[in-house]
Amino acid sequence: MMRIHNFSAGPATLPAQVLEQVRDELLDWHGAGMGIMEMSHRGKDFTGVIQQAEADLRELMGIPGNYKVLFLQGGATLQFAQIPMNLLGGRSADYIVTGSWSKKAYKEAQRFGDVRLAATTEAAAFTRLPRGDELKLDPHAAYLHVCTNETIHGVEMFDLPDVPEGVPLVADMSSHILSRPMDVSRYGLIYAGAQKNIGPAGLVIVIIREDLLDKASAMTPSVMNYATMAENGSMLNTPPTFGIYLAGLIFQNLKAQGGLAAMEQANSAKAKRIYDAIEASGGFYRNPVERSCRSRMNVPFTLANPALDAGFLAEAAERRLSGLKGHKSVGGMRASIYNAMTLEGVDALVDLMQDFAARKA
């Protein structure tokens, strides 16, 4: 079997060696006579799996001891509602909108109380981050929400905004978590859907500072209350056991590759090859994002002549390159090059880009 090079934005490609291990353990996990999907989530075997997954994630990200790690369901989109339900507490919150996902988070939060648009780059078609003088931050906000990597527009936040003292920073890291080292202590809450760098869709990870656990609205359902889920070790109800198991294998795989510093080096090299190909094309390919905030995970680009899009995608398919069509809201192409995307896959894409441009320019 020859696997394709999958550039999908999510669900995304997973490491082949991890999938092979899953295949080998699917019917009989470690001699248990059954697979992980068939086990009781409260049994000794699965308890060991979830505990090890948390320990490995803590090691990879350097998560301080005063933070809880929650393995939840509903994906990052559910967190757009769950965050204000748990943190707003009758106060106001600030949102910085830098793309489609932070815009959706801001819109959803408005259902639950007073939220402010602290800054937006929509007028610039989400091709940059706000300047410092564009930020209008409330020093008394319950929290400040950002999306540190916008999957659709390809904008990544490498430098955090100056957050007023005492205001927790809440970050949607769905599409670049585990891609490079990050200082968890600078955040009050981090959340991420699994289907980019963590594992299969359906699992979401929340990393929350303990002092933020007692602020939920009385109307918050138990299963959506961070404090309740923390008290129950993410198992108030049946958790997504298979997703947690697979995430744990991903964490072990990342550790074996040298951790997040090694991943940053590899991801920087992959992104550079694609951006260099765009810049060297003489305008045949274009990326609209300011250089300082170009994403290493999601590289959108357009062809100078949109009439060539279909031909580019057809040739990509012939070369077993998949998932390159851009989001419908921006058009063009998008190469999502998460941790599991190989350098071989990136080189195959660059070869196509160069060959196609040479023939069609």
Image (cartoon, rainbow, N blue to C red):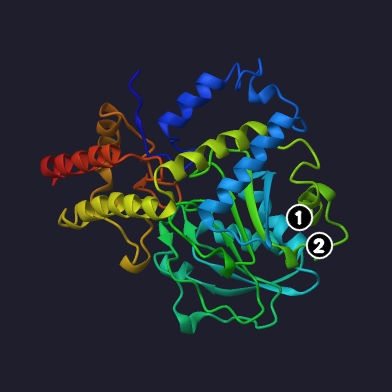
Q: Position of residue 102 (x, y in %)?
A: 56, 61
Give left or right: position of 265 versus 281: right
The quadrant holding residue 104 is: bottom right
Give left or right: position of 150 versus 310: right
Dot 2: element: loop
Query: CB under 8 Å between callouts 1 and 2?
Result: yes
As drawn, the residue found furthest toward the right would be: 218
Q: Circle 2: is it few (<14), some (14-19), or many (20+) Cα within 10 Å?
A: many
Q: Residue at coordinates 42% horizontally, 39% vertically from top-left?
A: 8
Q: Dividing the image into 4 quarters, which one contains the N terminus? A: top left
Dot 1: element: helix
Amino acid, disc 1: Tyr
Q: How far apart are the two marked residues, 1 and 2, measured between alpha carbons? A: 8 Å
Q: Residue at coordinates 59% horizontally, 58% vertically from top-left?
A: 63
Q: Is residue 111 in sight in this rendering? A: no
Residue marked by disc 1: 226
Q: Position of residue 133 (x, y in %)?
A: 47, 84
Q: Position of residue 181 (x, y in %)?
A: 45, 59
Image vertical order of residue 25 relative to residue 120, above or below? above
Residue marked by disc 2: 216
- Residue sitting nearer the eye, 63 or 360: 63
Who comes first in sequence, dot 1 or dot 2? 2
Q: Position of residue 95 (x, y in %)?
A: 60, 69
Amino acid, disc 2: Ala
Image vertical order of residue 254 relative to residue 157, above or below? above
